Amino acid sequence: MVLPDLPGPKPWTDKPVIDDPERFQIAIMTDRTGGHRPGIWMDAVGKLNMLRPSFVMSVGDLVEGFTDDRAEALRQWKEFTGFVDRLDMRFFFVAGNHDLSNDLLDELWREKFGPTWYSFDYKRVHFLCLCSEDPVLKIGEEQIEFIRHDLAAHADARHTLVFLHRPLWTNAERDLAEGRPDSTNWKRVEALLADRPHTVFAGHIHHYVHYRRNGGRQYFALATTGGGSQLRGEAYGEFDHVTWLTMEADGPQVVNLTLAGILPPDVVTEEESTRFRDFLAKTVVEIAPIFLDDATGFTEGDLHFRLTNEFGEPVQLEGEFEGLPLRGLEVDPEQVRLTADAGGSAERSVRVRFGEAIDFSRLAATVFRARLRTPGPDGLFAERLVPVVIDRRHACLPLGRLPAIDSPAWKTAAHGTDGAAVVLGDAASWTGSADGSFAFTTGHDEDSFVIDARVTDEKLEVGDAVEFFFDTRPEAKRRTDPRMLRGTVRARATPPDVAGNATVEAFLNRKPITSATASGRRIPGGYELRIKLPMKNFGRAVAPTTPDFGAAGLLCDVDEPGGPAAEILWRGSPAIRDRNTGYATFRWED
């Protein structure tokens, strides 16, 4: 830079020009999948093309994976590589657990991208791309040897940047804290990195945390670039972003570019994350459910609230109901306010009254919006939607007490859709209960969980099916985290053929339940089914003390050959496959 020699004051500062020839900028994109939200990744691609990094790194989970269908896996990779092709600069692939979720996907990765771990150099900075799925949640021995030789061969690097999918240091530390050896081998990797400047980037957990490890080095668990997230904001570490790294002479400078702004690298420190998540974990808002034997609906009753505070500071709650029908509605009081001291609790009741009986299905979407705060200038704030359960009492009966599906008693015991059902998919094709509806009962014994279903469907076509969804987690977990994750059982059965054979697909936590069976018979205007699932993979076999479970179902009704399906819901919501919102509660009876 050649500046004029001006007498007196100068119209510029005396700071240096930042133009070191070894200085460069890269972007890091994080998890796209695990319930990806379309459009976010491509929005980030467009903005990176404007920002012009030297190249782009990743930390895995690039496709949804979890499929044994090669054509579907190829479709997913074709879609993703199409996105990457839109980048103006080079993109480096790092494998996540979704990308390598089975042998087929592992084989496809090697066909398309070669090794699952590798390294390269740029302007005397060493880039080490590792695989945390070697196998699952581990750095294998072959990879350890690669790291050992690779780092020795690049001992003169001015800095080492490490990229992997899972933040294995948290798993390693958990193992050691519980008296077990490190099952991940991460501590061995740290020992190899310990004597050199390095920074580590991971993803997987879908919320952002900035760590200090291995002699004060910076470790980052990144949030999402379109992956599954509740997007509750910075305090939760939940936001869509790309990480922007500027390599300076004294090490990397890191900021986070959200699609709406820029966040500093310590937007959520480990200490802040621990305090906030402690606050979330140790403040519990409970609303006791109301279960009625009267199937005609709900008129009035008391909802009992309890705020339990095991956090180390006082907690204040205020909130109100959302989703209650307005027909003659009275709520006393309309707004709930409670304060619980550290280690204490607070309770109160709220009277809810309607001018006429309200069908339970119209109450299924009711929630209480709770706002929780701690006092003081650095007070914490969180908002929760707490499901409000006002429902008919549903029972999962012992098989010896389960009525036969062709008996009059079965109709009284069964739960089913009606003419006011919620319809998804090709909703315009559904003309009412005679076109598509279903009822069902559930039962159990020591070995089996049974669903008996009667389906009304005036025209059977390929694609017709009935599906059931069960959330077997304890009630408190089902309410506080509506995502259908662990403890999820799903079953989909087709209409029986003339011989009574039906096809069933069932899953526990996305893993097939191979011993599931279905059989039945065709009846005038529809069909009957019995679906059997092994109790060893269901509910009480997983958590024997759990008194109940959540359940919902839908009927897939295709009216024209090759046409789309109308999906008629019994309970649940439009997100029935992913969230338990609106699910009914079933109690085990012995």
Image (spheres, grey):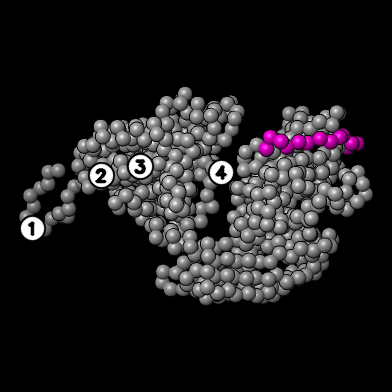
Q: Are marks 2 and 1 in contact (CB under 8 Å)?
A: no
**Amino acid residing under circle 1:** Gly
Q: CA distance from mark 3 to mark 1?
A: 60 Å
**Amino acid residing under circle 2:** Asp
Helix, strand or loop under label 4: loop
Relative depth, front residue between 540 and 312? 540
| Residue beneath disc 2 | 195
Residue drawn at (60%, 66%), measured in percent from left and top? Answer: 285
| Residue beneath disc 3 | 188
Residue drawn at (28%, 36%), measured in percent from left and top? Answer: 151
Give the magenta range: 513-525
Residue 518 is inside the magenta segment: yes
What is the tally of numbered marks visible in this picture? 4
Helix, strand or loop under label 3: helix
| Residue beneath disc 4 | 35
Q: CA distance from mark 4 to mark 1?
A: 62 Å
**Amino acid residing under circle 3:** Arg
| Residue beneath disc 1 | 8
Of the image marks 2 and 4, the number of the one nearer the N terminus? 4
Mark identifier at residue 52: none
Residue drawn at (50%, 73%), measured in percent from left and top? Answer: 342
Of the image marks 3 and 2, the number of the one nearer the N terminus? 3
In front: mark 3 or mark 1?
3
